[in-house]
Every structure is written in C-alpha cells, then in structure tokens.
Amino acid sequence: MQVPAPFEYERATSVDHAIGLLERLGSSARLVAGGHSLLPMMKLRLANFEYLIDINDLHDELGYVEVGPDEIRIGALTRHRELLESDELAGAFPIFRDAEKVIADPVVRNWGTLGGSLCQADPSEDLSAVCTTLDARCVIRGRDGERVVSMTEFHRGPYETAVGDDEILTEIRFPVRERGGSAFEKVERRAGDWAVVSAGAAVWLDADGRIADARVGLAAVGPNTTGLPEISAALTGSEPSEELYDEAGQLAAQGCRPATDMRGSEAYKRHLAGELTKRALRRSVERARERG
C-alpha cells in the first residue's frame, strides 16, 4: 500500500490559528511542515489522520536562529539547510554542522525542520541526539500559554513526545558556556541514511584545561535518544586523555540498549557506540582547546 488514507487539508496562518485548529480537530489532526517522516508513514498506513494542518506559512514566525551570550534560541520551523549554513550556530556549537552534513540529502534539508525532527521522536533521529547532548529545552505552546521541558521530558517513548494534541513546539533553547567544544559522529549504511549508530558529545573545560562538564548523546541504540549521565560523572574534573576517552566509550557501550536488526547486530552497535563516543569526545576537546 503506497497511498495514504483520505484526509482533509488545512493551512495555518499563525501559531494561534494552528493551535485553534488543533483544539477543534483534536487527535484526528497532525501538523505537517517538511513531511519527510510523516507522509511516508501515512503512505504505508502506519499513521492515519483525518486532517493535516500545513504550518509552512509560519516560517517567518518560527524560522530563526538567535544567538545570545548565554543562550541560543532556534525556532521550530528552522530548516535543516538554515542550521547547516548558520556560521554563528556553528561557531557556538559545531556539532550542528557536523550532524547536518550527514542528514539525508539537499531536498530533505531544504524542507525538513528542527521541530519536525524532534516531534517525530524517531530513536534514530540525529538532531534528537544533538539536542540531548546540548541539554536543550523545548518550548511548547498551547491555548493557556507556554511551558518549557527538558529533552528527557520531551521524548516519552518511540514516536511519542510531551506535545499535547492541542499544542505546538515553537522553540528550542540551548545554554551557552565558555570554553566549550562539541562534535558529532555517525555510521550509516549509505550517505544520508538513518544512523546505524550516531553519537554527539559536548565538553566544557575549566581554566586549567580540565573537564568542567561533559555530555554524550546517542541515537539508534534504544527506544529513545540516549543521554548518558554516568559519562558526565566519570569525565568531570579529569584531565582529557585517551584513557579517559576509552573509559567513556566503555560506559557508552554498556549503557545503551541496541537491538539486532537489518542495520547490524546488538554487539556491533555496542561497539559503534563506544568507538563513536571516543571520537566525538576527542574532537570536542580539541575544539574546546582551540576556543581557549
């Protein structure tokens, strides 16, 4: 089956209009921007909705990258291409450009959005790993106002988020700190494919060059994008070294929950989780040192 079930089409003209349509139509409606994840699922009848609400006209309202001294705010409708091309964003968080270079192809990057990637909540989604690594907070708006949730709270399970039937993800916020570096590593079967395993890392150094804080996020190794606080605990306060990266890699391999599938065995994915974690941490430290 390659044809979606019949549905009605609405086009939102503002965030408030989109929320009003969601309130009126309820769980039978779904927002669509790029549609690269939703529409294939509808064609395969894995997802069926009576209404699709097109929010592409809201790009002027929700498509932006605002870089401040303490925080970066990105609108949920910011396209992959805009994230890839933002020099300010790459200067603060090079992990974004690393990830965007290996996401899909130019067609997808021209239309797909950050908010759509997060709301799809696919366990293999690269930008979910990036946002988990950077300790992002998600702004969700409904008729009664806004609420802000962490990435841990945002992703409740595979293809399930904290966004209610009558709510919309509007913005993602990232804290900015000094002497930080970040990187993203991915293994895929072919260019632009979903990850076999991907890993993001972010490191912040103190004035003496020791690790003041570190975070690692993995994708495609469990039912959700995986954050590993045990790695943060092991690295904090230590001098960066190959031995330390090896320890973090071992923790990553032990702490994830991959499943054997057509992309690889559980053992292979655990090996990748460890190796990619080491590579991402090594590059993150190098970049943090360059920023000094």
Image (cartoon, rainbow, N blue to C red):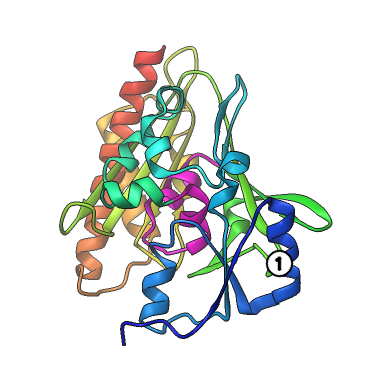
**Residue located at (36% from left, 35% from top):** 84
Look at the picture and state if 290 lies above or below 150. Answer: above
Residue at the outermost left position: 190
Q: Within the magenta stretch, is there residue 86?
A: no
Look at the picture and state if 228 lies above or below 260. Answer: above
**Residue located at (84% from left, 56% from top):** 144
Q: Is residue 102 left or right of residue 155?
A: left
Looking at the image, which is closer to me, 41 or 257? 41
Mark 1 Cα-neighbour bin, 10 Å: few <14, some 14–19, many ≥20: many
**Residue located at (44% from left, 56% from top):** 34
Q: Which residue is mark 1?
A: 21
Span shown in magenta: 113-135
Q: Where residue 165 appears, x then y in whole percent?
A: 68, 70
Q: Where residue 117 appears, x then y in whole percent?
A: 46, 55
Amino acid, disc 1: Leu
Q: Within the magenta stretch, is there residue 128?
A: yes
Secondary structure of the residue carrying tag 1 is: helix
Look at the picture and state if 8 lies above or below 192. Answer: below
In the picture, the quarter occupied by the C terminus is top left
Q: Main secondary structure of the magenta part?
A: helix
Looking at the image, which is closer to me, 8 or 120? 8
Q: Where residue 132 appears, x then y in whole percent?
A: 49, 47
